[in-house]
Image (cartoon, rainbow, N blue to C red):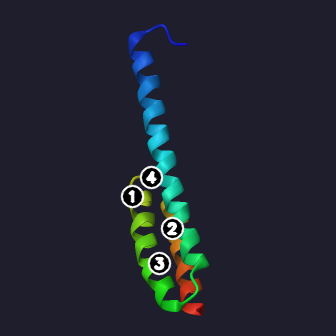
Amino acid sequence: MPNIKSAKKRMELSRKWNEANRRKRATLRTAVRKVRAAETAEEAAELYQKAVVLIDRAAGRRLMHPNRAARLKSRLSKHVKAL
């Protein structure tokens, strides 16, 4: 445990942001899973648009690497077009 007040504060803030980022990443992964599980092309296209928004936001806020975001969007669009 930290002894210095500022270190305690940083630890608390770090824990708070860690939890928030974990929730955001989980939401993102769920959106991607829904696109892959979609049965029809129309449903997949609609879910794809929502997933792309989440992916771009995550990449912009560095929740994931921008290259990973681009790769993920590319693979999802390929999947949607195949339906």
| Above or below: residue 14 compared with residue 78 | above
Mark 2 to mark 1 CA distance (whole Å): 17 Å
Q: Which residue is mark 3?
A: 48
Mark 4 to mark 2 CA distance (whole Å): 18 Å
Which residue is at the front of the view, 82 or 66? 82
Mark 4 to mark 1 CA distance (whole Å): 5 Å
- Can residue 64 be spotted in the picture? no
The amino acid marked with disc number 2 is Ala
Depth check, mark 2 against mark 1: the one in front is 2
Depth check, mark 4 against mark 3: the one in front is 3
Does the CB distance between marks 4 and 2 fall below 8 Å?
no
Q: Which is nearer the N-term, disc 4 or disc 3?
A: 3
Depth check, mark 4 against mark 2: the one in front is 2
Residue 69 percent across, percent down from the top left: 50, 66
Q: Which residue is mark 1?
A: 60
Q: Which is nearer the N-term, disc 1 or disc 3?
A: 3
Q: Secondary structure at mark 4?
A: loop
Q: Which mark is residue 62?
A: 4
Q: Which residue is mark 2?
A: 31
Mark 4 to mark 3 CA distance (whole Å): 20 Å
Residue at the location (55% across, 72% down)?
A: 34
